[in-house]
Image (spheres, coloured by chain):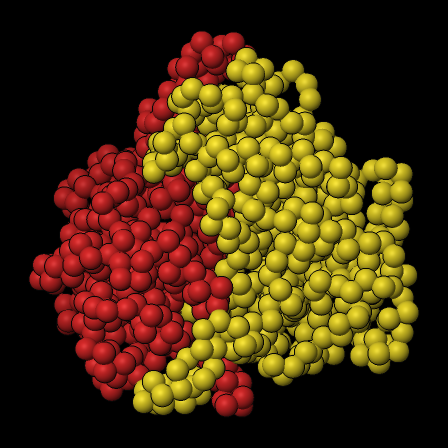
Chain colours: A yellow, B red
């Protein structure tokens, strides 16, 4: 069962342990299996029928899925050993960080605002990472991931054009939204614009490459082997992050730690992403759970949840398969979505990202609280309240038999976010193997693109 | 069928007409039925089996639900005639606007930043309305709807404490998150704080009332008859909106127009909210559609979509009933969620809010586009592209047999947003009548609140 508020409910050494019969197993043997102190701890006990009853995954269904996850891990190891999966291997690289830091330093020196032009995977990773920033010396980061004319018209609001920098990202070099943004914004940057624009795109003769060459813009290669939605740990996510003052090396190190643990573990049950993928697939197949809610109790992880929506939806949603990811935010959505979560259709599993908030933040004055009849708040911190609420949500969902997983983190920092991103990248590709879909394509969206282009051409 | 890109697919006179056999009916008789030129036009043809096949609502199921919606409209009329439903009647009020404008003017004069403390319904309506603002003379609006210690610590970032204003909103006067915010932030405002704080709460001896009285803070009454999530058109949404420079009278007038049309129409089929509720309920009951995606093609409506999540989820999600609302954003989510929407499980209906973007925004230079091999962009505006993409998404979804409704709007402005808000308020309560649930309670969330309080008390 879940631990009490204020206690650690999780085995710090062995992230995958809290499954069937996990406790004893954990205390006994986990530390022998690997030496990676995890940056997050997963508890999936409240996703299992032994804990929450008939709405949880049965031991049979879960173990069947785990066996598939074991195969997926073997595939992952083989691919990485063979030099494949550069999106995953990327977290182990450090050679590019110096050049990226130099580019970032240029933006930090020359710009008050940096707008990142790009959409989907060209934007969400950077958004997730930059959300951690509290660097007052950093330029203001704006992610223009839409072509809403109103928003584009506002890009120069509050910033002198000569202090506006751009990072233009399109893997294919042909993303029409990003091209339209670049073609309308770059010409308005004024003198010296070539010093304040960096283009990230894959090699080849593409419209964006031609545009960059014409204007002599600094251009960096997007690895053709890295799909857009898996690009967060590459320069696509890291250049914006470095501009915002995020420790890019720590992001990669956190991700690398998670990857190393996954590759080194003997059993899928010991790998959080594998156990998470298995329980998710088991719940969808056995209990018809079609919605997966990710609810971090941290404002700074709200964009991480948005990032996770793409990687999950676009990788798995094909051929009638996949589950629908939903991003929620704790404690806010207790006042918006929790009624539905607790008492609506039993079609969801929940993942609560639970930072160690207790004891942090401002303290509520004892005298004032007493005067107002709020003794239970007296002398407590707002972090205590956040911690109580996240535990209450976990317990209320579990008590209602709603499958609920907890990812507990000590800190919301660059390394932990890197670890969580790698967790979701791994969980996604493992789930794809279990569902027998290709996690790296997105064939259905081509139809919409073709239609949009036809409508544009029809009016030319 | 849906109209072509660039054409109007919708009957401007009769919003509910595009259902079974709607076209002829519309041209013939609609103008006689009412004289309200609607601020939005609904097209639900692509939710019906006659258009999209087996995944659409059948004529029988839709008409059955429409009959229920007819009863719901009668109930609504009777309630309003009897002086009930103040949340709906509110849009017809103007008497409070002068006082609210005075309060707003004080904030605009005395503050560089105004933080709105409150969560759920005390925040989302204001957020949705303020998202329209492009008033550079307005204070920066910050909505603190969470108790994340990190975010609260940052409230003073970039603003002198003596230029920070607060609007503190808790209907009950006992919302623990809002109290914790107020108790930790108000004491740090410095001299003259009582001039820069307005409290909105219902009458009665509550902790927030006592707090406000102790500090002699200006306090405005929250109507006890208006549930938090239905409060957007009251001072709860309008005071923040007025501070941000939004035309509050226009918001109410737009909502009033939508309400008047609903109350005056003879047939539920003629009322967009009634037809929308009916098709939604028919799809969930007949086709097992459990997810409702609201996807505005406008950055400024993204917060409106977030607002709609609460009213739908908390009003309908009870007793195992209700559908799960999801907020998406066009065109962004074409690069994130569209793959899942088109080719994942057929468990969703879609509502596309489609502004008239064509011809708006910056123009793409013909020479540059030509040089880059992008002839189809030459001389077009970014608004043209947005318009093409929203039409492409509607058509791609419809072609895949996914139930898709369009709410077309000419402008994204205060009146239109008021109209859309009233549409969703009406659609929600009508759907609740069809599902036989109480749209105004939220019994399940009490369990979580009690648990959180118990955890806090256990540590006292």
Q: Is residue A416 visible?
A: yes
Total numbered badges shown on the rendered structure: 0
B268 left or right, relative to A196: left
x and y percentages locating residue A408 in the rendered image? 65, 68
Residue occupying image coordinates x 40% and y 48%: B302
Q: Nearer the viewer, residue B268 or A16?
A: A16
Q: Is residue B289 visible?
A: no
B51 left or right, relative to B340: left
Location of residue B205 with respect to B157 vertically, above or below: below
x and y percentages locating residue A128 in the rendered image? 57, 49
Location of residue A373 with respect to A407 vertically, above or below: below
Quadrant location, the N terminus of chain B: top left
Residue occupying image coordinates x 47% and y 41%: A139
B212 left or right, relative to A443: left
Residue occupying image coordinates x 72% and y 43%: A439
x and y percentages locating residue A113 in the rendered image? 44, 38
Q: Nearer the viewer, residue A44 or B420?
A: A44
Q: Nearer the viewer, residue A132 or A327?
A: A132
Location of residue A53 with respect to A444 vertically, above or below: below
- Which of the 4 quarters of the picture holds residue B81? bottom left
x and y percentages locating residue A428 in the rendered image? 71, 51
- Which of the 4 quarters of the picture holds residue A417? bottom right
Residue occupying image coordinates x 76% and y 37%: A95
């Amino acid at each position: 069962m879940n631990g009490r508020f204020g206690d650690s409910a999780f085995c710090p050494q062995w992230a995958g342990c809290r499954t069937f019969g996990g406790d004893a197993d954990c205390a006994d043997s986990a530390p022998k299996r690997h030496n990676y102190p995890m940056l997050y701890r997963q508890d999936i006990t409240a996703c299992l029928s032994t804990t929450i009853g008939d709405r949880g995954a049965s031991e049979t269904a879960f173990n069947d899925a785990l066996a598939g996850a074991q195969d997926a891990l073997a595939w992952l190891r083989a691919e990485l050993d063979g030099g494949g999966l550069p999106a995953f291997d990327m977290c182990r690289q450090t050679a590019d960080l110096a050049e990226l830091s130099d580019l970032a330093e240029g933006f930090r020196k020359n710009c008050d605002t940096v707008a990142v032009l790009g959409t989907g995977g060209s934007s969400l990773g950077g958004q997730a990472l930059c959300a951690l920033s509290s660097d007052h010396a950093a330029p203001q980061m704006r992610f223009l991931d839409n072509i809403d004319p109103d928003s584009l018209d506002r890009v120069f609001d509050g910033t002198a054009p000569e202090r506006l920098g751009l990072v233009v990202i399109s893997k294919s070099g042909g993303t029409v939204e990003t091209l339209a943004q670049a073609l309308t914004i770059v010409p308005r940057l004024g003198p010296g614009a070539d010093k304040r624009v960096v283009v990230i795109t894959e090699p080849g003769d593409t419209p964006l490459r031609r545009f960059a060459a014409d204007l002599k813009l600094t251009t960096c290669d997007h690895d053709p082997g890295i799909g857009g939605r898996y690009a967060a740990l590459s320069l696509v996510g890291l250049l914006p992050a470095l501009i915002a003052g995020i420790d890019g090396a720590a992001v990669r190190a956190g991700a690398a730690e998670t990857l190393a643990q996954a590759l080194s573990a003997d059993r899928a049950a010991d790998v959080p992403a594998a156990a998470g993928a298995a329980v998710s697939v088991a719940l969808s197949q056995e209990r018809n759970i079609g919605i997966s809610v990710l609810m971090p109790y941290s404002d700074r992880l709200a964009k991480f949840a948005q990032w996770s929506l793409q990687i999950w939806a676009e990788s798995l949603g094909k051929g009638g398969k996949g589950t629908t990811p939903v991003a929620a935010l704790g404690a806010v959505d207790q006042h918006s979505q929790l009624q539905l979560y607790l008492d609506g259709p039993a079609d969801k599993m929940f993942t609560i990202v639970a930072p160690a908030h207790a004891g942090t933040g401002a303290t509520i004055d004892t005298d004032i609280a007493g005067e107002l009849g709020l003794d239970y708040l007296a002398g407590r911190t707002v972090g205590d309240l956040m911690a109580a609420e996240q535990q209450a949500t976990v317990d209320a969902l579990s008590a209602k038999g709603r499958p609920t997983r907890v990812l507990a983190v000590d800190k919301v920092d660059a390394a932990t976010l890197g670890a969580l991103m790698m967790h979701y990248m791994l969980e996604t590709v493992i789930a794809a193997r279990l569902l027998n879909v290709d996690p790296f394509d997105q064939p259905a969206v081509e139809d919409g693109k073709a239609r949009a282009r036809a409508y544009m051409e029809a009016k030319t």
